[in-house]
Amino acid sequence: MEEAALNCLRNTFGYSDFRSQQGEIIQTLINGKDAVVLMPTGGGKSLCYQIPCLVRNGTGIIISPLIALMHDQVAALKQLGVKAAFLNSTLDAYTIQQTEHDMVSGKLDMLYVAPERLTTSRFLNLLKKAKISLFAIDEAHCVSQWGHDFRPDYIQLSLLHEQFPDVPRIALTATADERTRTEIKQRLALQTAREFISSFDRPNICYRVTETQNNARSALLRFIHNEHENDSGIVYCLSRKKVESTASWLTEKGFTALPYHAGLPAQLREKHQHRFLNEDAVIIVATIAFGMGIDKPDVRFVAHLNLPKSIEAYYQETGRGGRDGQPADAWMAYGLQDVVTLKQMMAASQADEQHKRIERHKLETMLGFTEITSCRRQALLDYFGEVLSRPCGNCDNCLTPAETWDATLVAQKALSCVHRTGQRFGVNYLIDVLTGKDNDRVKQFGHDNLGVFSVGKEFDAGQWRSIFRQLISRNLLTVDLEGHGSLRLTEQCRPVLRGETTLLLRKESKSANSLRKGRRPNRNDQVSNKQLWQALRDCRKTLAEENGVPPYIIFHDATLVEMVERQPSNRQQFLQLSGVGKSKLEKYADAFLNVINDHIDTEKHDLADTISESLLLFRSGLDIDAVASKRKLKISTIYSHLASCIERGEIKLNEVIDLNPDEITAIHEALLSHDDGSKKLKPVYDMLDGMYDYDIIRCVQAAVLPH
Ligand code: ADP
Ligand code: ZN
């Protein structure tokens, strides 16, 4: 049995090993038992039911509420040679009938259906005529009324257990909390199912938070420009207006950026989503609604131009990056205005007291997250009840440790200023008073006579905004309920005012946007051979267009990266690549192998060209130094060119180097005593006590050793 699952993983999907708990989950289903699976986005949930569907007899029924996702998965499965289909409202009557017929006559390995169709009595009767291998309930948190994605149709799915007690079931979700999990088990009658809970860590995502003063957009531009020039990404904004303006601004700057929000016509939204999925390097600028039901694996960055409302929202949105396991960035810019706006929204909320309290708590936690100076991943996982024992090394705070400073005295000045001016003014006015601006307004209120007037001249307005932001985030100050933006003192500020505690604030570094060295290279830096990489991407794009599927359905980036690194030259080597199974080998190996071979040929040609040019110049009478400076190459490069010529007999050793026969013999002997086929020069160099340069040894080697 176990063997069957592993064979399927290797032959059909082209992966060599199971990830974390996949193997166990799959085995549970193959053995006919139920499972509840909690795995983060990108963790590899699909394989958990797809492989049992293929190993067990009959058709596997996968219940999914997301039409776009069904479509994508079925397209991907077909590429793998799997007999998969879906049923949803987008199909015409004939196709539906045909698909139902295929299911009943046992022609399908997998069938994806929407929950509302599954629970009709007509469909249930069809199911009874068919042989069913398992039921997979994807997005199982939709059964929970507690969560945000509740779908009434999901409640009825308990009938699967009643009507098909012998068919194993698996419920899957990426939603973490305990309460939802309990509801899933209860409502779907899965109390006795085995539970598999994976870590929620997404190690390939680098979390970064940048504080900005009204210039979040330029920070975003720098970030994309420097690190994600040719990548797909999502930029989240809070309002439709900001979505529109950001998208057109990025377009002006030369990027392909498309807006997406609920106010756009459905057709346009669909078009933009389609382009995002099918083209390279498209940036979607969206309100938070975008992303649900899209599993584009190669989203390389998720940027927030506003503060998300909660850690849950932040984690879900950033989780849409890097599903393929390759490096991705979760980047956020926020400033004082965000903090004020969100606090006001919260205050104005119509929700009942209990809900308001929850919302407030969530926002406060989010603010706390942005301001921390310790590892962000540890904080995130801690929020979800997981312990990461060491700092992650892949977040901004780990990579560029934040500095703090003792701000007790400064905070006292700010807090007294709020107090002395009567808790009636907003940040800008307070800063005017602190920095001693005797403008009309300040004079009118007579605040130029206060003791706090002009006591904060050591900071400029920008620095004060950062200080106020942190004071609000830490709840030492609060924003008024009426929405005028005036600040008030809170209970928590008393110990600071009295000097009973020390307040450490974060020092804003000017370069918060860029990370110091030590950062993981992003994928584009990682790929060693840009030309080949681009050629492979082009090949993938052509094949995708021919097949009418998104490029990542042909091959993931990870597979292309491996092609660049390993440069397979035949089908057998091609099959070793991760993500290449039998079906894709048949379909695509030749096309990609051709690209790789062409590339190797061109490289050889280029090399041959550059070598003969060096030889020509050398022959024309220039010495090696002169050839190097004329060609703007290193001297050792010219030596290596000439060594190749020596090796091929195009020039004699003594024409290149000036050594007497004894010296040549000495080097020759040293070479022979280290001739292990590796052609390594260092041991030879050492043996000769560094008397001869590597360049010289290389030329002698070319002349005397068999090639
Ligand atoms: P989820 O549904 O949990 O978000 P997916 O099922 O879409 O995640 O899987 C995420 C990515 O990981 C996919 O690209 C998938 O092909 C890949 N993947 C899953 N399992 C493995 C594995 N065992 N080895 C290599 N890649 C895998
Ligand atoms: Zn970290």
Image (cartoon, rainbow, N blue to C red):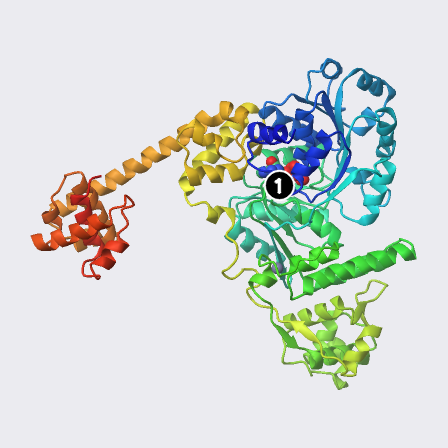
**Disc 1 beta carbon < 8 A from ligand 1?**
yes
Find residue 273 and report its horizontal and vertical position in percent. Answer: 65, 36
Please give the name of the residue rendered at 27% of the width and 40% of the height, measured from the top-left corner.
607
Q: Quadrant of the N terminus?
A: top right
Query: Along the line of sight, which residue is nearer the eye, 77 or 484?
Result: 77
The image quarter containing residue 232 is top right
The image quarter containing residue 572 is top left
Q: Could you tell me if residue 640 is visible in this image? A: yes
Q: Indicate the amino acid at tag 1.
A: Arg
Q: Is residue 391 left or right of residue 639?
A: right
Q: Secondary structure at mark 1?
A: loop
User: Ligand 1 shows up in which quadrant of the image?
Assistant: top right
Query: Along the line of sight, which residue is nearer the eye, 249 or 133?
Result: 133
Please give the name of the residue rendered at 37% of the width and 31% of the height, measured from the top-left corner.
597
Vertical comparison of 221 with 172: above or below:
below
Q: Is residue 582 left or right of residue 234?
A: left
Q: Is residue 52 left or right of residue 566?
A: right
Please give the name of the residue rendered at 54% of the width and 30% of the height, measured from the top-left corner.
554
The image quarter containing residue 184 is top right
Vertical comparison of 83 with 234: above or below:
above
Find residue 620 and report its horizontal and vertical position in percent. Answer: 11, 46
Mark 1, residue position: 19
Find residue 691 and report its horizontal and vertical position in percent. Answer: 18, 61
Crowding at dot 1, Cα within 10 Å, few <14 / some 14-19 / many 20+, comes out as few
Q: Could you tell me if residue 348 is visible in this image? A: no
Total number of numbered discs in the rendering? 1
Vertical comparison of 455 with 50: above or below:
below
